[in-house]
Amino acid sequence: MSTHKLAYARRAGFVIDYGREVEEEIERLQREMDKHTAIQQRFPERWLAIQLIEQDMGIQTSLKEIEGGATLLAEAQKSIDHLTEVYGDDLDVVIADHRYGWIHGMLREVVTRPKIDRLSLSDKIDKVVTHRLLGIPIFLFAMWVVFKLTADVSAPYLDWVDGVIGGPLTNWVVAILGGIGIGGTWIENLFVDGIIAGVGGVLVFVPVLMFLYLALALLEDSGYMARAAFVMDRLMHALGLHGKSFLPMLVGFGCTVPALYATRTLENEKDRILTGLLVPFMSCGARLPVYVLFAAIFFPDNGSTIVFGLYLLGILTAIVLGIILKNSLFKGKELSPFVMELPPYRLPTLKGLWFHIWERTGAFVHKAWTVILATSIIIWLLIAIPMNGEGSFADTDVNNSAFATMSGAIAPVFAPLGFDSWEASSALVTGFVAKEVVVSTMAQVYGVEEAEEEAEPTTFVEDVWEIITSFVSATGDTIKSLPLIVGVNLFEEEEEAEPTGLMLAVQNGFEISSGGHGALASLAFMVFVLIYTPCMVAIAAEWQELGAKWTWFSIIGQLLLAWLMAFVVFQGGMLLGLG
């Protein structure tokens, strides 16, 4: 070892050996420093030589201001050029490797580590939830709990919103219109039977969506959704699909539009197109009000199971179609690897949960005041126009309206599916605009002839007090229903809620059109809503992301598949004696 190295070693207590080539250049630079006293007095020689080889910008700037610094920098550049020829461009990595190698060796010599379990809590949980055999059943159970929570626990708030809209809100609008002298006119009919019935019929389901988004946010923020994607990746690859495809599909449970845009993360064009074709089969939040309405009418004791089954059917349909398309139109495409990092489990924050709920529910409410409002007014206008029989504008039997005539023209197409009434057909047609409009349309077409009960007049203060007290009562009912999710009844059995006028009208309409098999026809109707073409905004996103050819392929294919699957449900159920 040279005199300079020994001196530095005595001062520092140790010397890291950077290898023969680097050490030779360090010594050469130290010899150069011996020629310049100003440099020796200001910097430790070996440390300075290493900093110069690492091209420390601060040191280079400082040397320019010291006598002899320019010469030393020129010599350092020669060392850098030589070492670059030896090691390539990773000179800094070479030096770092020697440092960490020395540290690692020192630790092994002087540190005794106790034998402990190095698995973190997240690792231990992952051994169960991402298990090769248990992972998928756990994921399906988690989703079942989500829909159980959504369908059952939100029911009291659904009744509360329905009561507020159908009671105080309607009474206030009627009173205001009467106060300005237009009560009893077609304008009042527009507000009550058009706007309130249409928009209000959809807003009733806001509590359902809020509970859905709360449950999904809990899974996302806790870190479990990343595990779900990891678990489903194995299944997707086993079926010949791309693991990354499941991520846009997960987004599709909230809304189809961002899910279609999420396919941009797929590098392969065929992967992106195939995933884009399958995303619409993931049941978006807009379809949930339809499921909840029909499940409450025809399957009151198994509503959450029916809703869960529909979501599961959408996933299975996408998987089967993915296999078929992969082995036909997309045959021969190569799968690129799916790499993702599993975040640690963490406790969701109230602020984060509220942000998710507010953002997604706000988008739904915004649609209610724009798309659904416009559609409700158009539907009311078509209902108000008489086509057959007696009547005048805004004063005609709904069955004689222009809307009934137009919808009745396509109703025979759905006769083999068990719902050939013009009311059901009209709801499916307007559902092209937005799936929430299906419920909105039914609220209008079934509610037009609904008789209103005479009620004692109330004051504004009494109405507000009734809203507050009924909300408190709904909250109490919700708390009572929480143990029922796991089948535990901690409270006395309460009377079942009375069905609304809309529920009775829909039930009667489907029983008549299906020849007494209303439950089976309603199930076929829900399957049709699940499978057929998504909303207009989603179609526009498909056009933008997939192109015109694949968009038309998707639209026509989904309509045909929806009719076929609904046909199998109804006719197959009839053959089996169900419904």
Image (tube, rainbow, N blue to C red):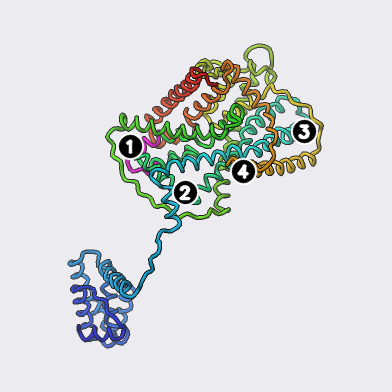
The label shown at residue 483 is: 4
Q: Which residue is mark 2?
A: 224
Q: Which residue is mark 3?
A: 175
Q: Amino acid at mark 4?
A: Pro
Q: Amino acid at mark 1?
A: Gly
Q: Quadrant of residue 35?
A: bottom left
Side of 325 where 163 appears, left or right: right
User: Looking at this view, is 67 or 98 the one in front?
Assistant: 98
Q: Position of residue 431 (x, y in %)?
A: 53, 28
Name the element at disc 1.
loop
Q: Amino acid at mark 2?
A: Tyr
Name the element at disc 4.
helix
Q: Position of residue 454 (x, y in %)?
A: 79, 27
Q: Quadrant of residue 278?
A: top left
Of labels 2 and 3, the one closer to you: 2
**In whole angstroms, how far apart are the C-alphas of marks 2 and 3?**
51 Å
Q: Which residue is mark 1?
A: 240
Task: Give me the residue at 46% from left, 32% from top.
Answer: 313
Side of 478 where 346 appears, left or right: left
Task: Give me the residue at 20% from left, 67% from top.
Answer: 84
Q: Earlier in the sequence, mark 2 or mark 3?
A: 3
Side of 262 where 523 appears, left or right: right
Q: Amino acid at mark 3?
A: Ala
**In whole angstroms, how far apart are the C-alphas of marks 4 and 1?**
41 Å
Q: Which residues are magenta?
A: 263-277
